[in-house]
Image (cartoon, coloured by chain):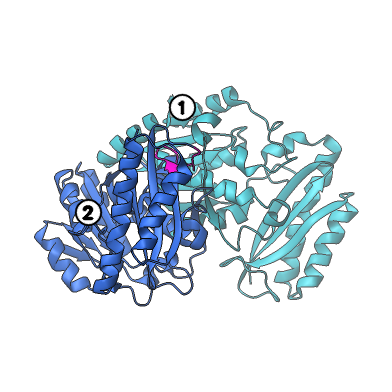
Chain colours: A blue, B cyan
Amino acid sequence: MRTITDIKEMQNYSKEQKRNRKIIAFVPTMGNLHAGHISLVKTAKRKCDILVVSLFVNPTQFGAGEDFDSYPRIFKEDIIKLEREGVDIIFYPSEKEMYENSKTSVYVDEYSSILCGISRPSHFRGVTTVVAKLFNIVKPDIVLFGEKDAQQAFIIRKMVKDLNFDITIETREIIRESNGLAMSSRNSYLTDIQRKQASHIYKSLIGAKDLIRNGERDIENIKNYICKIIKDSGIEKIEYIEIVDDNNFNLIDSINGSVRILIAIYVGKTRLIDNIKVDV
Amino acid sequence: MRTITDIKEMQNYSKEQKRNRKIIAFVPTMGNLHAGHISLVKTAKRKCDILVVSLFVNPTQFGAGEDFDSYPRIFKEDIIKLEREGVDIIFYPSEKEMYENSKTSVYVDEYSSILCGISRPSHFRGVTTVVAKLFNIVKPDIVLFGEKDAQQAFIIRKMVKDLNFDITIETREIIRESNGLAMSSRNSYLTDIQRKQASHIYKSLIGAKDLIRNGERDIENIKNYICKIIKDSGIEKIEYIEIVDDNNFNLIDSINGSVRILIAIYVGKTRLIDNIKVDV
């Protein structure tokens, strides 16, 4: 396994691999790897000749007052985990090299200002911009994202289609802790009590899925059901509970076809998101 | 020579060429080719194994009330000219395939809202977005742009650097008609009298260059000198006369180092731009 920090070196490496007809898979991460990331890495490994994982805590996707400074950075531990998975290249650039005097951004309109985009208005612009940069640097054929960030995955697919990146985007289902809590780097901020409270997010989603499977079609009834379970757990701040058409991420009036329920809440000061797909 | 209209077919062609270690040069155009374009094509031809020219009148870089509908489309004549130059591939996509349901844009902040960006606020967003798309479709190693659109060339270089496109951008000097008028597709809108008036744009730039070479350093004096020559020619509407540092496109207070004088005027209803570089 080799660690590359220089953008030009990464590009030249990938260019040479592609000339040799190698398939490059890529898993972009902000480090602090958990079982969710490792699941993506394992899947990616089976699909390629060369596996690249990036470790870069991207400043432009954090808003003012968010946890950029305190975001866990344990790159040495991350590297050990990645070596174990047979990763070929770790791309680990500096913030300076990525953003010095940068004025350019990539923006996916409409989908970046709903759901998480309401409370985090600059977040998805930061995500799409850094992902476009990483695509141009790593030159992957296949890129894997986790479904926990379902809106992010949808927006990246849209960017790839709209800007004609010649890349296949694949997503993998959420990996959960034993109590159902979706794996997240931010789970490390939680106390034991908070972790127990947070486990009710998934319980509410599973319950809602059952409700729908049993015939419930009213959006408000489903949201109220979820809201009650979450509030009863002691979680006080719900940012949103929304249901979208999973094919186009439009908010829907009634359940029909493939839908996705998405939740963002705060446990204490820690913001957590989760979602579940329901096919009707 | 082969004409490709399908995005995926173009990508697959370029992918295969790159696997075979071919160097791809690319000249993006909106068609209606003149000697300026052909000069770029000839230069590009010498630098590559495979030469791709795109013909696409890009709707998103025209503002409301601009000349998108009347923009000259003479693709059959263009294709004959390109075949003569040994072009390998003409990429000629439909508007529908390029933009159907597109929500994504690429924007270079600061530099897109000055000079031409003042009267054409959405123009450069349209340019950078379509150029990013074409880069991802054609996968060029080298791309050539004309210096007549100096601000465009600067912005594209900035986009390439900021988004890490692994592409070399080269520019070539303005090709002029015998009376000095910069070659432009829009010159076809001019009457004989207007064409004579428009020839004074270049005369004013040459005169200003001489002024600077003879020691003039005051920006206002230089602008007033240009303004007088243009007004005396009978041209009534000057959009801007500006002088920037050629290295960073910042407006400057005094002449120092490499500068560029840029002009936008209207002859009748036809908007024309021109510029000249002056090294002090």
Secondary element at tag 2: loop
- What amino acid does circle 1 point to? Thr
* Percent of width and height locating residue B194: 84, 40
- Residue B141 percent location from the top left of the image: 38, 47
Please state, as top left, top right, bottom left or bottom right, where the N terminus of chain A lies in the image.
bottom left
Q: Nearer the viewer, residue B196 or A114?
A: A114
Q: Nearer the viewer, residue A79 or B233?
A: A79
Residue B239, picture quadrant: bottom right
Q: Which residue is mark 1?
A: B5
- The answer to whether residue A5 shows anywhere in this view is no
Q: Residue furthest left?
A: A84
| Residue range (magenta) | A244-253
- Relative placement, left or right, of A188 versus B37 is left
How far is mark 2 from mark 1, CA to CA?
A: 42 Å
Q: Residues within 10 Å of mark 2 (few under 14, many from 20)?
A: many
Vertical relation: B280 (above or below) A168: below
